[in-house]
Image (cartoon, rainbow, N blue to C red):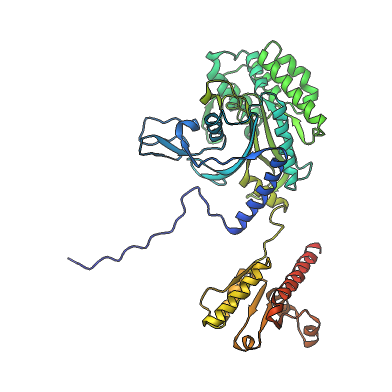
Amino acid sequence: MNDKQKKPQKLKARLPRGFVDRTAGDIRAVNEMTAKIREVYEHYGFDPLETPLFEYTDALGKFLPDSDRPNEGVFSLQDDDEQWMSLRYDLTAPLARHVAENFNEIQLPYRTYRAGYVFRNEKPGPGRFRQFMQFDADTVGAPGVQADAEMCMMMADTLEALGIKRGDYLIRVNNRKVLDGVLEAIGLGGDDKAGQRLNVLRAIDKLDKFGPEGVALLLGPGRKDESGDFTKGAGLDKEQIDKVLFFVGITDYAESAARLAELVAGTARGGEGVDELNFIGALVTSAGYGPDRINIDPSVVRGLEYYTGPVYEAELTFDVTNEKGEKVVFGSVGGGGRYDGLVSRFMGQPVPATGFSIGVSRLMTALKNLGKLGASEVIEPVLVTVMDGDVEAMGRYQKMTQELRAAGIRAEMFQGNWKKFGNQLKYADRRGCPVAIIQGGDERATSVVQIKDLIEGKRLSGEIEDNASWREARVAQETVPEADLVAKVREILAAQAEDRKRAANV
């Protein structure tokens, strides 16, 4: 028997499926974007709120199955008091819990915004992650659809603040009540038809994917896909299907409004929904938001099982190239609607609410496609190199670094193995440092420093071919008194900024 101890296995570094690490560039891009969104929300009078990542599972509306672990799309654990807690699935349910718990202290209408990560215990796939960021704004306690109209205007203003020009986006508005009226008008009212109504909603939700022909099959007998799999339909007849397709196929609301009102005539909920759509249309038009920015569009079917009134979606209308090299419309980057039933779950009394959510990662991708993100590049730090390791020398290097920082210049003192000076310059090159500060024993004795313009030096090494060119070029390395260190570094950084500006305008 071999008593020799087995060598312990090295732990394998691996990222959980459906999660991603964020680099410095990603983090800065998100910070830049969310700062602009936050500014718009603040101008509209909304205040920030932060809720914890964990909530009790029943508060999220995700109910426990008969098993040892919840498996309803949430990541969950059991507390020591045997209560199930889950990572938040969205930012709306935690808001509803917060409002209900603090109802007597909150001033209604309560206008708040929240940004943060949400978690979905779902199968990951291309572009589908288990953790992603949302940025929400909500108004709680405002029953009138003027609150919904304001949300649509704020969405439009947010997209423009991010640099998306008019013509490249559209806020599309629909109303759940109108669809309820259409369904009632074709004979699908009443509790006994709830299952069939749900099948109709699911069929309509496939409009973008399958087109009117595919949706007609899902509304009727059913649809077989390319693999041969059959999806049972909602069982509507041709007349019913035609009326549903007319509703979701409206492209010019003004032209179709009269016919739509006629379709839902006799249904109280449908008539109310049409009135609300017309009211929203009048409000946004009066405020200067024409149909090129906010448009009544009955084909919007997002979350119709969840929302109770107006629904709205922010869509980017410009083309992008997908992973297959095809030109496609970018599509939705966020949306929301009225959800009057969510807070009421906790209260036992009606509490109206409306709000929308921006998909931060998706919107960031769109902004990168437009070149609207990361334009204000972060300058890497000036590197103070280390030539000697004694206390006196190290003290001088640290003092120089602090003087640069105090002047508002990003700077760092080299913290690696300083004995190989070439490695320090390699580090500066890989890091993209704009300037290196060098002071050996000779310079220290005369209280001077060498300042190396690393950007100019790199350019000169590739462009200068003779001594005459060198004399005419900006000097890549200079020796200056210690007292002039900050001023000289500022001068070099300003010259580099001018070079970047000229290059961008070529």
Quadrant in which the N terminus appears: bottom left
Look at the image and tell me whether residue 137 can be seen. Answer: no
Residue 364 in the image: x percent, y percent?
65, 49
Q: Quadrant of residue 469?
A: bottom right
| Image vertical order of residue 351 relative to residue 325, above or below | above
Residue at the limit of the structure toward the top, as seen here: 266
Residue 217 in the image: x percent, y percent?
60, 25
Residue at the limit of the structure toward the front, as seen here: 105
Q: Quadrant of residue 379?
A: bottom right
| Image vertical order of residue 193 relative to residue 140, above or below | above
Look at the image and tell me whether residue 48 can be seen. Answer: yes
Front in this rendered view, residue 420 or 167 = 420
Residue at the limit of the structure toward the left, as seen here: 1
Left or right: where does residue 134 sit relative to residue 372?
left
Q: Quadrant of residue 260?
A: top right
Left or right: where does residue 146 sit relative to residue 184?
right
What count of labels does the image hold? 0
Residue 237 in the image: x percent, y percent?
62, 16
- At x 72%, y 57%, the residue is 375
Front in this rendered view, residue 289 or 362 = 289
Quadrant in which the C terminus appears: bottom right
Front in this rendered view, residue 346 or 187 = 346
- At x 59%, y 87%, the residue is 441
Front in this rendered view, residue 276 or 406 = 406
| Image vertical order of residue 292 relative to residue 184, above or below | below
Residue 66 in the image: x percent, y percent?
37, 30
